[in-house]
Image (cartoon, coloured by chain):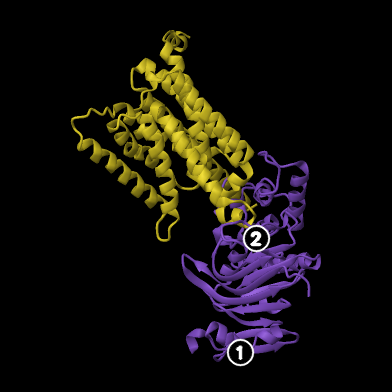
């Protein structure tokens, strides 16, 4: 019991846990649609692009967070635009836009070596440094995106699963796709402080992929993926505290372990089903 | 003559600046059942996409229910059945949810569908021979069942126009006959139907009106007028032989009816 209560003796832990749960649930829900659209690296791409905004912001004495917001939104719109062009696949668009913006950020920093730019928090996150304003921001983003998702669930899910079909049935699919990109960019921006650029793809993709192994409907997938994302944050935070490892990696490792367990269980269940079917058919084929 | 359901006037349309059809004039009146035939790449699907606002229009006008169709602006009161190959088989969608998507643009802004909407989906599933499959993931349905599911999705909003892109492509003979029967029933109830097909003998020859397309309209009328050796050669660039089988017309290879290896 002490293992569960001890961390709460430290004020930062409750804040970090709250932020982690919100980010886990938000990224888990959006991740379902990212995985379905086979754009698993868009989270990684958007977060890498952040450096293209943070570097000029720091060098211009502007809040780096504003630079991150601007870079993520620009990257999201560019990925959506380039990915729609003839002969460019969406995964290539992610790779091109994110690496070019990342390179632009690195180039700016390297050209201004006299200015100190601390990239550690940006790359790895600093969940233990989360303050009340960060939690308010993540909570606001979660509430707004959940409300939008609730109201536009039908046209949104139709577009994500069959964009051409949705458009032919009167849904403004292009607008819905743009809104999805902006929602994803918003989720990435509010999550960077918590998990960092390098691990954000994991919190988007892993819970959704785990849910995909067990869910049979879109609604179920979104609920299960959100819960898994939040659960990974809770377990990961406790592991981080007691094992004294960084919280971002701990959350991702817990999430990855969950995926491995569910994958193994699915494989075992599938093997048992096949075995039972074979036994049944052998029984039918046996001479009387 | 009243307002046509569909009116193409001098339409040149295509994708990314490259026209796929040029100077198309075509009128379809309410209650008609029309098939568009032509070789691959002739612009059959482009005509359907022009009607759904998902292709670029470079010249002329496309009118649907008397209103101009604008590219990028989705159209209303149209049921559309895409080619089966455009459906991802492993989507986490149950059959009834897939059908209900046809109401996405007009249903209430909540994540669930009403009892009446679900009842309508179940009724359509039963009518299309898919009763009992309501909660089955679409990936577990056969190609023919998926095709009927897409037809149900197009029908659920009670539209007065249903368009189908290659509805009988890749389905077995029984399913093909089922689909044609369903379309005939739907048409008898007053729904205008426009479909594209590669199948001249089973599908096109059975329709009351067909339009031959090869980037432009090559011929338009009853199969007995349109399906001539000259017209089909002009449309497809291949020599064919027309065989009368009672009221039906059969299109066959112009060469001797010997096995391919024996030629």
Q: Is residue B178 left or right of residue B231?
A: right
* Colour yellow maps to chain: A
Q: CA distance from mark 2 to mark 1?
A: 32 Å
Local secondary structure at mark 2: strand
How far across and down, in percent of the image, does residue A105 sit? Answer: 28, 39
Judge depth for marks 2 and 1 and give the one in front: 2
What residue is at 75 percent from the left and 87 percent from the top? B246
Which one is in front, A269 or A196? A196
Tags 2 and 1 on a common chain: yes
Q: Helix, strand or loop at disc 1?
A: helix
> Is residue A67 something that shows in the picture?
yes
Chain letter of disc 1 in the image = B
The quadrant in which residue A3 appears is top left
The residue indicated by pointer 2 is: B80
Q: Colour of chain B?
A: purple
Q: Position of residue A88 (x, y in %)?
A: 40, 57
Mark 1 residue crowding within 10 angstroms, few (<14) / some (14–19) / many (20+):
some
Q: Position of residue A228 (x, y in %)?
A: 51, 30
B110 vs A78, nearest the viewer:
A78
- Residue position marked by numbered label 1 in the rendering: B229
Taking the spot 67% from the left edge, 78% from the top edge, the residue there is B210
């Amino acid at each position: 019991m002490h293992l569960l209560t001890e961390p709460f003796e430290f004020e930062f832990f409750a804040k970090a846990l709250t932020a982690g749960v919100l980010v886990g649930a938000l990224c888990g829900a959006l991740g379902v649609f990212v995985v379905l659209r086979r754009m698993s690296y868009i989270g990684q791409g958007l977060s890498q692009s952040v450096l293209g905004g943070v570097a000029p912001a720091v060098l211009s004495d502007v809040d780096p967070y504003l630079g991150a917001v601007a870079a993520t939104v620009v990257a999201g719109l560019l990925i959506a635009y380039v990915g729609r062009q003839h002969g460019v696949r969406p995964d290539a668009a992610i790779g091109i836009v994110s690496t070019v913006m990342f390179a632009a950020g690195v180039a700016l920093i390297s050209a201004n070596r006299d200015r100190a730019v601390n990239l550690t928090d940006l790359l790895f996150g600093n969940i233990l440094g989360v303050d009340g304003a960060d939690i308010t921001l993540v909570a606001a983003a979660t509430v707004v995106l959940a409300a939008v998702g609730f109201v536009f669930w039908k046209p949104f899910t139709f577009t994500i699963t069959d964009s051409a079909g949705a458009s032919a049935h009167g849904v403004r699919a292009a607008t819905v796709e743009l809104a999805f990109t902006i929602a994803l960019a918003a989720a990435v921006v509010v999550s960077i402080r918590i998990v960092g650029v390098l691990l954000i793809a994991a919190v988007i993709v892993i819970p959704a992929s785990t849910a995909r192994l067990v869910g049979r409907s879109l609604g179920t997938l979104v609920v299960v993926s959100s819960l898994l994302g939040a659960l990974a944050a809770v377990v990961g935070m406790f592991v981080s505290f007691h094992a004294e490892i960084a919280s971002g990696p701990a959350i991702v490792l817990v999430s990855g372990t969950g995926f491995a367990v569910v994958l193994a269980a699915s494989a075992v269940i599938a093997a048992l089903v096949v075995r039972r079917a074979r036994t049944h058919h052998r029984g039918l084929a046996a001479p009387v | 003559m009243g307002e046509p359901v569909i009116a193409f006037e001098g339409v040149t349309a295509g994708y990314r600046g490259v026209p796929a059809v040029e100077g198309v004039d075509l009128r379809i009146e309410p209650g008609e059942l029309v098939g568009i035939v032509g070789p691959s790449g002739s612009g059959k699907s482009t005509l359907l996409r022009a009607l759904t606002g998902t292709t670029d229009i470079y010249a002329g006008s496309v009118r649907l229910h008397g209103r101009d169709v604008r590219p990028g602006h989705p159209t209303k009161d149209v049921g559309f059945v895409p080619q089966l190959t455009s459906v991802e088989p492993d989507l986490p969608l149950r059959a009834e949810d897939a059908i209900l998507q046809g109401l996405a643009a007009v249903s209430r802004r909540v994540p669930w569908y009403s009892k009446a909407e679900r009842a309508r989906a179940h009724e359509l599933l039963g009518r299309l021979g898919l009763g009992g499959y309501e909660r089955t993931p679409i990936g577990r349905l056969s190609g023919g069942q998926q095709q009927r599911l897409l037809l149900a999705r197009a029908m659920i909003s009670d539209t007065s126009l249903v368009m189908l892109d290659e509805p009988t492509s890749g389905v077995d003979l029984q399913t093909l006959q089922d689909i044609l029967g369903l379309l005939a029933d739907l048409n008898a109830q007053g729904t205008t139907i426009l479909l594209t097909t590669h199948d001249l003998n089973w599908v096109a020859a059975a329709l009351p009106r067909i339009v031959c397309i090869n980037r432009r309209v090559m011929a338009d009328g009853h199969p007995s007028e349109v399906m001539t050796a000259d017209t089909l050669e002009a449309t497809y660039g291949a020599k064919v032989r027309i065989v009368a089988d009672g009221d039906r017309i059969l299109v066959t290879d112009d060469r001797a009816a010997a096995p391919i290896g024996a030629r």
